[in-house]
Image (cartoon, helix red, strand yellow):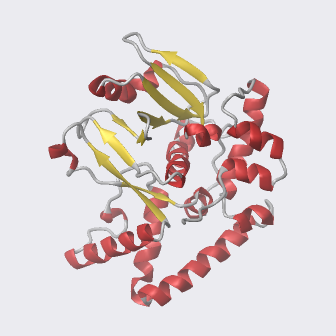
Amino acid sequence: MVLGPFSFSEYLTAVEKTALAADVLNPDVRFDSHQHDLLLGLFDAFLEVGGLPEAVLAGPAAHGEVRAQILADYERDFIRLFGEDLLPIVKSCFRSVANFVGSPSKNASVVANPSSSLNEKINEVFSRLENWHLLLVSQQRGPGPEGSHKYLPKRYMFDTGILRHLREAAVPSIRLTGTLTAGARAPLGGIIENQTAIELHRRGLPLCGWKKSSSGTEIDFVYQSSARVVPLECKAALAVNLKHTKGLCDYMRIYGLDLGVIISLAPQAELSLSGGGTIVNMPTYLAERLA
């Protein structure tokens, strides 16, 4: 058993909003614009606090201090398991994932111009952190197996609150709706992608993305259940339209699929494609409904 952080519905229960938690899990419930705005605000708080129970229950005034203590406890464990010599690499691996989440994971973002021996140590640290489920890894595939080996994986933090604690230490916290400038909003896509990765990992599913080519379209995740395969794309947009669907459309056309999903900040909606097929927009606070 892998015990992970709270999901959004569990977070809502912890902050005594049990009726909303039940509605979030109920696929038959649709939310009006007022409820959508309310849930976006609550999800914004959830993404900042994260899902670690001790941090959630500490309340807004103390969750940062609790997360800092949890990270300090991890560092003591890392020293015991890795030794002090590797601790700087461990911390750099965490910072690298937090700073570049949503982008290919490169050893050069951990340590600039690493030597061959340093590359081996970085790979060892990444492997151990993944085995302990502190980092989640998503392999990137292409249309043909011969091209997939050249794509670097993506990595995600096991808790979005920890990611933001590391990433936003020296900058104001980014808000889902309150941060309006494009430059300041840019990291939100990676944060939403990180939380979606957590939800997929919670179901025991392997994480995998897809690229049409090295310079072509891509999608963030391929959701594979026993019943079907569904491509997923994460967007920080407050409204979605067909311009957001290019990667999904390419994947659906190549593999003959009739359904794709966008995870975004926009209300629930369905987009019908001219060539057939449907793309469902799922608000990010409903990602638990992917099951």
Which residue appears at 69% of the width and 57% of the height? 49
Report the side of 14 relative to 130 (left or right).
Answer: right
Image quadrant containing the C terminus: top right
Q: Position of residue 194 (x, y in %)?
A: 51, 51
Which residue is at the far left?
146
Image quadrant containing the N terminus: bottom right
Q: Position of residue 88 (x, y in %)?
A: 43, 79
Q: In front here: 222 or 105?
A: 222
Q: Position of residue 193 (x, y in %)?
A: 50, 45
Up/down of 265 relative to 11, above or below: above
Q: How many marks?
A: 0
Residue 251's image quarter? top left
Which residue appears at 40% of the width and 83% of the height? 86
Residue 212's image quarter? top left
Which residue is at the far front?
226
Which residue appears at 55% of the width and 85% of the height? 76
Q: Position of residue 286 (x, y in %)?
A: 63, 38
Q: In front here: 246 or 99?
A: 246
Up/down of 11 relative to 250, above or below: below
Report the side of 123 relative to 240 (left or right).
Answer: left
Which residue is at the far top?
274
